[in-house]
Amino acid sequence: MTDTAVAIAADVRAGRRRALDIVEEHLARIDSREHEIHAFNLVLAERARAAAAEIDRRVAAGDDPGPLAGVPVALKDNLCTRGVVTTAGSRMLAEYVPPYDAAVVARLESAGAVIVGKTNCDEFAMGSSTENSAFGPTRNPWALDRTPGGSSGGSAAAVAARLVPLALGSDTGGSIRQPAGFCGVVGFKPSYGRVSRYGLIAFASSLDQIGPFATTVTDAALAMDVIAGHDPRDSTASRVVPPPFVRTLVEAAGNLRGVRIGVPWGLLTEGVERDVMRAFETALDVVRDRGAAIVEIALPHSVHAIPVYYIIATAEASSNLARYDGVRYGFRAADARTLAEMYDRTRGAGFGREVKRRIMLGTYVLSAGYYDAYYLKAQQVRTLIRRDYDAALAGVDVIAMPTSPTAAFRLGERIEDPVQMYLSDVFTVSANLTGLPAVTVPCGLTADRLPVGLQFTGRALDDADVLRVADAFGRVTSWSSERPAMAPSSTSH
Ligand code: GLN
């Protein structure tokens, strides 16, 4: 018996295991490891027990609680949960209790999932290491002196340490894929519009997308079957009916024959760590052996992806974060004499350094006189990047790249150097700028035993295809079953 989401749900639905026992086991793991990792901002033990007991009652009564019956799930703390504090990693929202559930939360619960807690993240999802959380950093379960990546570092670390089989995160420039890669788990950023953003605390609305973390591609697909789909409350949610994710993987059965995989070698020349490059090249050999064709492609405008991303993301953030004014949401500074002083003090004390830096950058690139030179230009280059991808994807099914140029870096190593920090997103931001689906799967370990991620990017709304290729890779390699020493071994009984 394994502890994948698929196995747990099958057992609970068939009455072979009780949801309550499964929750207790995962809560016990959290109890024993959380003090070292700090994956969670909040553990909802009692709520989880009550939800699990209700699942068990329904199974006993002959009901089917759904495809995620009894599966413990962790939520990034920027996903709104009704009646449960949702902080987005910010002092500004340290006591914010949303009056509604995010669409994905409601979908998970109605599929039988058991929410066990809210995971730590960089403040308002701005960061690549989880060190920008107002509540202290999360540590990488593979090496406690390393970051788990970010911004969804808590979700990645929780899954890597097997504290939960499944977690959700959000990805604006890599915040699912980079931490999943750093922590040796699967992470998927769906196509823009595939999953409703209703109830996700906005960072950069044209880039934000919610997606799953799991230990297998099939588990990520199972989560997608539950969370994907149209939602009238998100005006950018696609009306295209989502594919059956798990069924697509089952039917493809790991076959890679005839699949064309593009590699943008020109982008991979500089700054990629040797062990990362070696793992990437070995991974390409594996897929080639299984019948895939590896084709060189060019993505000439992607060299501009980082500056383009950091202009657009900060511009949108400066607008989205204007709502935190001390009047309508969260924290309000005391003792201000005038309204202006109240705004000033509230935002001065409520936001952390990186968030302030981004609000200032974003305000600057949108201001009269600079708008054309920065924001408008960035939007134009964004279009060129998208055209490069469309042209490449007309000839190949997916594009392969390392997820990040390096393995997990040390806590403190980049926090004083924002540009170094931003560079860890070189291979991930393009999928957000283009809206394309992208997944990371474990593809090796460095000499220091740190995980390396392999990223596949696919055509818009071809989400199932991207997962199919990742699944095929996962089936013929054993990297996904490597786990940090602190995680329990693979059997749960
Ligand atoms: N690391 C990137 C940033 O800091 C991406 C963050 C994200 O995807 N939320 O903006």
Image (spheres, rainbow, N blue to C red):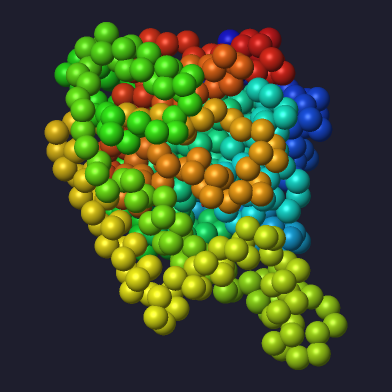
Residue 25 seen in the current view: yes
Residue depicted at x 39% and y 80%: 369
Q: Is residue 333 left or right of residue 72?
A: right
Depicted 435 relative to depicted 322: above or below: above
Residue depicted at x 37% and y 37%: 438
Q: Nearer the viewer, residue 206 or 400?
A: 400
Which quarter of the rendering shows the N terminus?
A: top right
Q: How many marks?
A: 0
Depicted 481 relative to depicted 421: above or below: above
Residue 5 seen in the current view: no
Outermost residue on the right side: it is 335
Q: Nearer the viewer, residue 483 or 95?
A: 483
Q: Nearer the viewer, residue 125 or 190?
A: 125
Q: Is residue 270 left or right of residue 396?
A: right
Q: Percent position (x, y) of residue 308?
A: 38, 56
Q: Percent position (x, y) of residue 273?
A: 48, 26
Q: Percent position (x, y) of residue 142?
A: 65, 22
Which quarter of the rendering shows the C terminus?
A: top right
Depicted 330 relative to depicted 286: above or below: below
